Amino acid sequence: MKKFWGWFLFILLLILAAFIYWKFFFTYSEGYRAGLLQKFSKKGTLFKTYEGEMILSSVHSRADIAIASEKFLFSVTDEKVAKSLDQSQGQYVVVHYQEKNGVLPWVGETPYIVDSVRIADNNPYGNNPTMN
C-alpha cells in the first residue's frame, strides 16, 4: 500500500508541475505589435512591475489622425527594455512580445511580456508622433 501512495503522490506532483509550467512559463504565442506608446510606468502595491500601453491604429484619416484604434496592454521584465520604452513615450514603436497563459504577480499584470523594442521606421503620424 505504501508503494501505491508513493507512486500516486509522485504522479500528482508531476501533473501539478506540468500544469504550473503550462500556465505560467509556456509561451502560448509570440509576435510583433506596432503602435503609439501612450503610457509606460513602474507600478504595483506589493510587487513593482513595468506596465505599458500602446495605441494600435488600424484606420487613419487624411489628416493622419487614428479613427479606429485599440489598446495593447503589456508588461516588461527586462530592465534594459524598460529603459528603452521609458525614453520612447509618445513615439511610434514596434515591440516583440510573448503571450503566456497566466500571470504571476511579480512578473507583471498582463499575459503579454515585451522582450524587445525599436522605434518604427514608418510612423503613420508623420514627424509629430502625438495624435492631436
Image (spheres, rainbow, N blue to C red):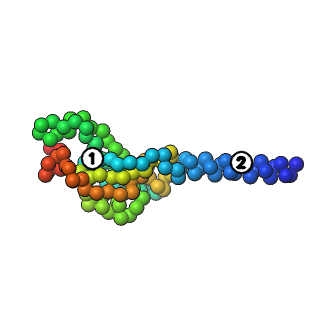
Count of marks, rendered view? 2
Q: Residue at x 39, y 51 (%)?
A: 97
Residue 22 location in percent, x, y? 56, 48
**Which residue appears farthest toward the left when viewing the image?**
63
- Quadrant of the image for the C terminus? top left
Identify residue for label 2: 12
Q: Is residue 39 left or right of residue 77?
A: left
Local secondary structure at mark 2: helix
Residue visible at 28% across and 44% down in the picture: 55
Residue 69 shows in the view: yes
Q: Earlier in the sequence, mark 1 or mark 2?
A: 2
Query: Disc 2 residue type?
Result: Leu
Q: Which residue is nearer to you in this view: 106 or 28?
A: 28
Question: Circle 1 is placed at which residue position?
Answer: 35
Q: Quadrant of residue 43?
A: bottom left
Please tell me whether mark 1 sits on a helix, a strand or a loop: strand
Which residue occupies the foreground of this view, 37 or 48? Answer: 37
Relative to residue 59, is residue 13 depicted above or below? below
Q: Residue furthest right?
A: 1
